[in-house]
Amino acid sequence: MKSFEPAYLAALRIPTRLFSVIRQLGEHKGKQALYHQQAPEILERMRKSAVIHSTISSNRLEGITAGTRRIKDLMAEKTAPANRSEAEIAGYRDVLNTIHRSHRSIPFTDGIVLQFHRDLMKYAGKEGGRWKSTDNTITEALPDGTRRFRFEPVPPFLTPEYMESLHRDYRRVSAEGEWDPLILIPFYIIDFLCIHPFLDGNGRMARLLTVLLLYHNGYEAGRYISLERIIEGTRESYYDTLYRSSQGWHEGRHDIWPWAEYFLGVVLAAYADFQERFDRQREAPGSKTKRVMDAVEGFETDFSISELERVCPNVSRDMIRHVLFQLRDQEKIEAVGRGRGAKWRKMKPDG
């Protein structure tokens, strides 16, 4: 598709400022496994919060809202949607949960896009899981109530062909390995939005597919921090960069970098937010004890204090010893050996 055509890619030069962003994101990616070892209970709280905020913000960007109490009940699946807005919210919830739960086994094809759209619309009584059947010009609502033309997407009769080509080209360029995946994701999203393949839900679908593509490339910020909330907070830049990068798209003359730079900034902001929230909750009263206990639970074989220190940075050796002695007194662990080579072993429940 337009952003993946060989001639277009050959003429592109990545702005120097983006190399620093990509490097920082790679560093965040490398730390993800350590967070899981350090405090899984903190991550679980962050995950639940992120799903709620993502669903609310992504729908609110499209003017879809509901009361706070109703949203909480919908997110907890304690109630059924009572109107169109709630139906849209419930659909987004389901697709997002599917991505979080099953991203490793979800292939990235145009068929999956159709399936996600079907599920997005399943409560709303709208046509879901089919490419658009009529034109859908993109306009902007102005403060005085009028609308302004922004972009003319691909016509309906070309949409299936364009979507098939988009996925084929994305897979091809990804497999060639010449471009960083973090660059290819915003390329895909701009092409998707310029095609605008559905009569309704294109923006929400683009944000859901963003989360899936980040997962597929090892970036898990979207599990714990709402990318959609960051986008909502910078909506003017979101729409402005999309507009700027879509001009000339049909002719393959568009400037991809305003949108790509904004996109990578959102992902970097999500990781910075993640680090701040994680550190703040990790240092809360009682959290260090819980971190050591969780780390002990995570070991499958005998472990040493030094190994615990690596898993629990910023927890003193004295605190680690204190927790180990507590667990020993509770007959949950036992010492193995003495001196520098001493280790600890979890005891069986009946032991």
Image (cartoon, rainbow, N blue to C red):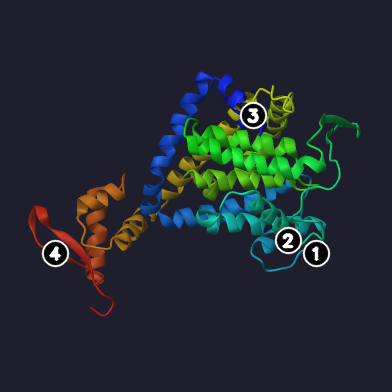
Gap in Å between the C-alphas at discs 2 and 4? 54 Å
Of circles 2 and 1, which is in front? Answer: 1
* Lower sequence index among marks 3 and 1: 1
**Taking 160 as reference, is 263 above or below it?**
above
Gap in Å between the C-alphas at discs 3 and 4? 57 Å
Point out the image quarter for the N terminus: top right
Mark 2: few, some, or many residues within 10 Å (few <14, many ≥20)? some
Circle 3 sits in a helix, a strand or a loop, which is it?
helix
Gap in Å between the C-alphas at discs 2 and 1? 9 Å
Residue type of the residue flagged with mark 2: Arg
Residue type of the residue flagged with mark 3: Trp
Mark 1: few, some, or many residues within 10 Å (few <14, many ≥20)? few
**Residue at the (76%, 58%) spot, across then down:** 86
Residue type of the residue flagged with mark 1: Ala
Percent across and percent down for residue 61 are 73, 42
Is residue 30 visible to us here? yes
Residues marked 2 and 1 touching at CB (< 8 Å): yes
Percent across and percent down for residue 176 are 48, 35
Residue that numbered label 1 is attached to: 82
* Horizontal relation, residue 50 to residue 24: left or right: right
Q: Nearer the viewer, residue 211 or 333?
A: 211
Residue that numbered label 2 is attached to: 70
* Lower sequence index among marks 2 and 1: 2
Residue that numbered label 3 is attached to: 259
Point out the image quarter for the C terminus: bottom left
**Taking 305 as reference, is 30 above or below it?**
above
Mark 3: few, some, or many residues within 10 Å (few <14, many ≥20)? many
